C-alpha cells in the first residue's frame, strides 16, 4: 500500500462510463484469493487486503490498481515462506492500534502471536467504538488481544502441556501499559465500558505481562497501516517470513 495515497469511497465509479470500465475487472475474484492468502499464510498482506475488501460493493480503478500492487508484491516475495525455528520458542505477542486514520474514523486493533520465532495467529479488526485518544484505542486493542491469549493458552494446554509462565505481550503505548497495571489516568477512562477492563484481571492473574517496546520494533504495526516497502518487509521477516 502507498502510505501517501490512501484509498477511499470517493474513488468509486459514479458515471456510466466508469462503471462500464470496471464491469469486466475480476475484482471480487482477486480479492477473494488475497483473503485466502492473508488469513492462512501471508500476514504481511493482511492490512492491504482488509483495505481493498472495503470496496467490494463498488470498486473503482484506483482500488483495482491497489489490488494489482498486492499481487506484484506477492510475486516479488514468492520465495518467502513462514519459517519456524529460533531462539524464542515460547508464546510471545505484539499488540497495536492505529488511532483514527481510517475513513470510517474507527481505530484498528491488531495483534500477532509468535511461537518458535514464527507467526501462528494474527488479526486486525475495526474497533466497535470511536475512541477519543491513542491510549484508549490501544487499551481496547490490548483487551481484544487478551482474549486470544487465553484461547491460545487453552489450545496449547490441550495439545501439548499447560504453559507454566505468563505470556509476554509487547505494546508501544506507555499510557496503556500504565492503565492495565493499577489504573493510572483513571479519570480519562471512566466512560469506558467495564468489559474493556477485562485485561486488568488477566494481568493480575499473571496470565500475561504487558511490556513496552518501541514502535520501530512493534511487529503488529504492519497490520494497522500502510508502511514504506523497506519497513513492511522488515516486519514481515520479524513475523517469520523469509526466503527458503
Image: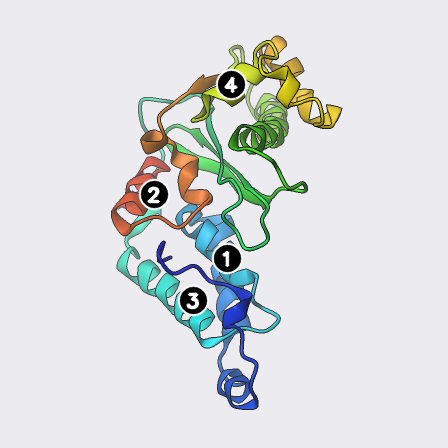
User: In the displayed structure, does residue 104 sit left or right of residue 234?
Assistant: right
N-terminal label among 4 and 2: 4
- The residue that mark 4 highlights is 177
Query: What element does badge 2 sit on?
Result: helix
N-terminal label among 1 and 4: 1
Q: Are marks 3 and 1 in contact (CB under 8 Å)?
A: no
Between disc 4 and disc 3, the foreground one is 4
Q: Residue at x 57, y 89 (%)?
A: 16
In the figure, 115 relative to 227: above or below? above
Where residue 179 appears, as percent x and y from the top left, is: 57, 17
- The residue that mark 3 highlights is 67
User: In the displayed structure, does residue 207 sit left or right of residue 232?
Assistant: right
Between disc 1 and disc 2, the foreground one is 1
Where residue 206 appears, as percent x and y from the top left, is: 58, 10
Query: What element does badge 3 sit on?
Result: helix
Query: What element does badge 1 sit on?
Result: helix
Between disc 1 and disc 4, the foreground one is 4
Density class for disc 2 (Cα within 10 Å; few <14, some 14-19, many ≥20) is: many
Residue 171: mark = none
N-terminal label among 4 and 3: 3
N-terminal label among 1 and 2: 1
Residue nearest the viewer, comparing 6 with 221: 6
N-terminal label among 2 and 3: 3
In the figure, 142 relative to 211: above or below? below
Between disc 2 and disc 3, the foreground one is 3
Among the 4 quarters of the image, the one containing residue 109? top right
- The residue that mark 1 highlights is 51
Assign the N terminus to one quadrant of the image.
Answer: bottom left
Number of marks: 4
Residue 236: mark = 2
Where residue 91 appears, as percent x and y from the top left, is: 47, 23
Density class for disc 1 (Cα within 10 Å; few <14, some 14-19, many ≥20) is: some
Amino acid at each position: 500500500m502507498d502510505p501517501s495515497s490512501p484509498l477511499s469511497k470517493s474513488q468509486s465509479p459514479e458515471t456510466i462510463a466508469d462503471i462500464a470500465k470496471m464491469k469486466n475487472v475480476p475484482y471480487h475474484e482477486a480479492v477473494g484469493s488475497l483473503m485466502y492468502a492473508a488469513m492462512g499464510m501471508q500476514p504481511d498482506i493482511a492490512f492491504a487486503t482488509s483495505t481493498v475488501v472495503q470496496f467490494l460493493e463498488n470498486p473503482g480503478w484506483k482500488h483495482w490498481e491497489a489490488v494489482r500492487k498486492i499481487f506484484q508484491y506477492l510475486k516479488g516475495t514468492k520465495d518467502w515462506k513462514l519459517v519456524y525455528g529460533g531462539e524464542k520458542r515460547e508464546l510471545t505477542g505484539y499488540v497495536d492500534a492505529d488511532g483514527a486514520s481510517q475513513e470510517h474514523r474507527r481505530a484498528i486493533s491488531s495483534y500477532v502471536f509468535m511461537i518458535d520465532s514464527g507467526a501462528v495467529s494474527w488479526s486486525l479488526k475495526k474497533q466497535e467504538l470511536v475512541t477519543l485518544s491513542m491510549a484508549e484505542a490501544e487499551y481496547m486493542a490490548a483487551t481484544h488481544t487478551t482474549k486470544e491469549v487465553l484461547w491460545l493458552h487453552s489450545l496449547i494446554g490441550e495439545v501439548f502441556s499447560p504453559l507454566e509462565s505468563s505470556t509476554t505481550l509487547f505494546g508501544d503505548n506507555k499510557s496503556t501499559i500504565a492503565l492495565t497495571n493499577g489504573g493510572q489516568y483513571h479519570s480519562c477512562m471512566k466512560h469506558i465500558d467495564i468489559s474493556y477492563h477485562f485485561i486488568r484481571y488477566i494481568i493480575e492473574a499473571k496470565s500475561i505481562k504487558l511490556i513496552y517496546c518501541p514502535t520501530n520494533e512493534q511487529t503488529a504495526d504492519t497490520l494497522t497501516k500502510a508502511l514504506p516497502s523497506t519497513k513492511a518487509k522488515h516486519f514481515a521477516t520479524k513475523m517469520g517470513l523469509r526466503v527458503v
